[in-house]
Image: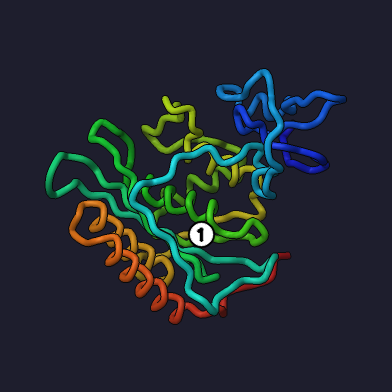
Amino acid sequence: MTWTGEGAKSARLCDWCGVLILPLGDQWEHPAELRERFSRTVCDEPVPGREPKSRELVYGRGKTVSKDKHAVQGRIDGYEAPEQTAITIGCGGSQEFNPTGPPWRPTSWAYVADNGQWALGTATQGLSVVGDHAVGSVLRAIFWALEQLPDSNPITVVTGALDVVELTEKWRAGNLEMPSGYTTERGSGNEAKMMRLAWQFADDPDWLSARRVRRGEHPLQQAADTLAQIARLWATGEITKEQAQTDGEHAARDALSRHGHGQRQPAK
């Protein structure tokens, strides 16, 4: 049986492990479907915490992921999307070696959504981390976009990365394959971002989708690539956080003015 969150009245998030719990008499329990899904981290003695948000209710777990150190987000007024109205997001990434100082691999990401929201950031990854970092940077952009955008709107991702689109299609079909070289175990106990992302696509295949565009063809995707480069420059100390915020907002505003609202459609 697959967990959907339907009919989960009086649900709470467990204060110990973050997995959703339901009342059983005067006790609380983790549903069997969620005990199986989160078998590595679910606890045996649940303690009721806060009520879950709508996306957490569908997913079955609260937010237990670490934030990126170098990250900023903003909003351009005038592009708000009503509930149930589709949102398009351009997602991009940048992956290069640090040109100065200790050797590390800045995995930078960014997104621009046609509801006016945008963000950029960088994850610090050592040279021992394996896998396709270019794919990982775009997936990271999608992850943070879904974390920060409204739960009440279906979302279409546009990206120039074909590998990302193919992987998300597998997730939508229920195949939770991870990117090559990506591991899901975390010493901190936090949930792996890509596993959470995979479950979101699997649980909401009619709500979340991705399509490929040629690089530079779509204004939102083009701006996302630009913002990811800005994030990298900030992370490597070539520009300040204030400059990254200013440049990011300028690029997002320009992209939104070129994109407009024309592609937005109500959810069916």
Q: Horizontal and vertical percent for residue 230?
A: 28, 62
Q: In which quarter of the image is residue 242?
A: bottom left
What's the residue at 34%, 63% (across, down)?
227
- Describe residue 89's horizontal placement relative to residue 255 as left or right: right
**Residue 130 spot, x, y in % from top left:** 30, 33
The three-letter code of the residue at mark 1 reads Val
Q: Where residue 185 sits in the image (x, y, percent)?
A: 45, 26
219 and 114: which is toward the camera: 114
Q: Relative to residue 22, is residue 60 drawn left or right?
A: left
Please give left or right for residue 151 compared with residue 161 in the image: right
Of residues 105 and 50, the one nearer the viewer is 50
Within-10-Å neighbours for mark 1: few <14, some 14–19, many 20+: many
Q: How is the image coloured?
A: rainbow
Report the label total.
Answer: 1
| Extreme-top residue of the structure | 44
Q: In which quarter of the image is the N terminus?
A: top right
User: In the rendered view, does 52 fall on the left or right side of 6?
Assistant: left
Q: Identify the residue at the far left of this view.
A: 100
| Camera-nearest residue between 58 and 173 | 58
The residue tagged 1 is 157
What kind of element bears circle 1?
A: strand
- Which of the pair 259/99 is nearer the observer? 99
Residue at 13% x, 49% y is 99
Q: Which residue lies at the image location 12% right of the left edge and 44% below the top edge?
A: 101
Image quarter hosting the C terminus: bottom right
Q: In this view, does 51 lie above or below 70?
A: above
- Residue 133 percent across, percent down from the top left: 32, 44
